[in-house]
Image (tube, grey):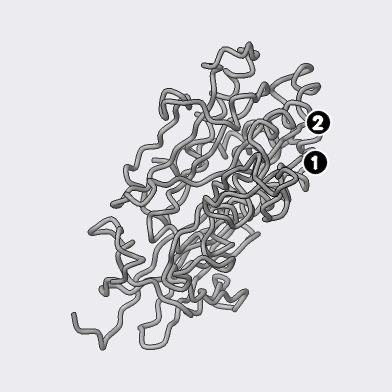
């Protein structure tokens, strides 16, 4: 159903191609959530002459242990890192379309983990004048992923949050309503991902304090149209391992970009994306850092590291090759593919080769999970 709805939107977009335009005159502030590879540690911000701590702050980044990276190191999974990969790619796409973009951070250091109130006020300053002229031309987006803090037992739903000034700070009600609209309209675009397993499958879009019981710090002082994307759950182990793959993270950015194309009534991409994941068709992955998959789904199956995925044209000519990483996700992505018919050849040592026939459409992701047969495997 999601693909059908998006397909209708793209047909309507194509019908107006004669008057197509870029994002010149639009402004977006991107908050790449958190920052700094520090997992809840206290850092002294100021000391007195005797060396006593006067003030301190607590880092709120999130590290999650994975099979290849069980210990806290910058090479492992940190929410700050995947948030930044998504945000930088979104900025690249928006700027290429003529949009004026500012980010809360472009690196991943402790110093980049800005105070949440500062981020909101900075966005107000960057977007405020343009919002006063036409609030439909600006947007704030905070890019995050979700977690249950060690209690995740197979939860991976999609969540968008917006603010309606429950703290009665006197913010512009029309701006808050536009933020709610963006949160709702973007949900189906941002959930366009057949590689993950959504559970529950329906998106959640809520006012922050009604969902959480408090107002999100980054939205509390925001007085321009905007919303926060929680995306997928980074403590759902199969998703944690997928988020170690930068191309997988960039798929989220692509979905965010397509939403902004739709929202700002700008050109949709003229090319498509081919993506997927390669897994064993029977073997369950058993590991202490992969233990909360949704039973009975492909997310419990062993992702195949080092699989060779080749994109072929319809006549079988080799176009591109992607080798899946060593991070137990089996993910592959081919970018900027012209619309048309193609084949995807998937090979891995010890497995039977599969060749898929696919059709690529402009501004769409052609994605699938492929299960390879190991003829020597005995359950």
Find residue 14 and report its horizontal and vertical position in percent: 63, 39
Q: Residue at x 41, y 87 (%)?
A: 349
Vertical placement of residue 319 versus 337, above or below: below
Quarter of the image that includes the N terminus: top left
In front here: 55 or 77?
55
- Residue topped by disc 1: 98
Q: Residue at x 41, y 28 (%)?
A: 211
**Residue 315, can we see it?**
no
Residue 154, which numbered label?
none
Q: Residue at x 26, y 88 (%)?
A: 376
Find residue 330 and report its horizontal and vertical position in percent: 45, 70
Residue 177 figure quarter: top right
Circle 2 sits in a helix, a strand or a loop, which is it?
Answer: loop
Task: Name the side, left or right, on which 6 lies relative to 280.
Answer: right
**Residue neighbourhood size for the residue with mark 1, other residues' Cα within 10 Å, grouped as few (<14), some (14–19), many (≥20):** some
Task: Name the side, left or right, on which 147 lies relative to 131.
Answer: left
Q: How far apart are marks 2 and 1 (CA)?
A: 8 Å
Q: Which residue is drawn at 66% across and 40% down?
A: 54
- Residue topped by disc 2: 25
**Residue 219, can we see it?**
yes
Task: Name the side, left or right, on which 324 lies relative to 173.
Answer: left
**Residue neighbourhood size for the residue with mark 2, other residues' Cα within 10 Å, grouped as few (<14), some (14–19), many (≥20):** few
């Amino acid at each position: 159903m999601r693909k059908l709805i998006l397909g209708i939107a793209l047909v309507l977009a194509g019908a107006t191609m004669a008057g197509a335009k870029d994002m010149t005159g639009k402004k977006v502030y991107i908050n790449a959530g958190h920052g700094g590879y520090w997992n809840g540690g206290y850092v002294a911000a100021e000391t007195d002459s005797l060396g006593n701590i006067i003030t301190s702050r607590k880092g709120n980044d999130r590290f999650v242990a994975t099979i290849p990276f069980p210990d806290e190191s910058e090479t492992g999974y940190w929410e700050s890192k995947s948030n930044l990969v998504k945000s930088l790619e979104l900025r690249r796409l928006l700027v290429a379309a003529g949009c004026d973009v500012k980010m809360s951070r472009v690196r991943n250091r402790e110093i980049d983990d800005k105070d949440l109130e500062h981020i909101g006020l900075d966005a107000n300053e960057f977007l405020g004048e343009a919002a006063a002229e036409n609030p439909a031309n600006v947007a704030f987006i905070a890019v995050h992923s979700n977690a249950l803090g060690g209690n995740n037992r197979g939860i991976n739903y999609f969540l968008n949050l917006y603010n309606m000034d429950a703290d009665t700070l006197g913010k512009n009600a029309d701006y808050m309503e536009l933020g709610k609209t963006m949160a709702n309209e973007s949900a189906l675009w941002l959930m366009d991902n057949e590689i993950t397993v959504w559970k529950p499958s329906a998106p959640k879009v809520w006012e922050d304090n009604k969902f959480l019981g408090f107002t999100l710090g980054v939205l509390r002082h925001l007085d321009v149209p905007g919303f926060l994307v929680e995306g997928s759950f980074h403590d759902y182990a199969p998703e944690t391992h997928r988020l170690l793959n930068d191309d997988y993270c960039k798929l989220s950015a692509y979905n965010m970009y397509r939403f902004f194309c739709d929202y700002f009534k700008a050109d949709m991409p003229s090319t498509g994306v081919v993506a997927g994941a390669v897994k064993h068709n029977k073997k369950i992955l058993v590991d202490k850092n992969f233990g909360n998959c949704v039973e009975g789904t492909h997310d419990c199956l062993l992702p195949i590291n080092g699989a060779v995925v080749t994109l072929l044209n319809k006549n079988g000519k080799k176009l591109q090759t992607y080798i899946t990483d060593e991070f137990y996700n089996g993910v592959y992505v081919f970018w900027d593919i012209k619309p048309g018919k193609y084949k995807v050849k998937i090979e891995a040592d010890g497995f039977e080769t599969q060749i898929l026939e696919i059709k690529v459409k402009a501004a769409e992701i052609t994605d699938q999970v492929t299960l390879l047969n190991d003829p020597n495997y005995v359950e």
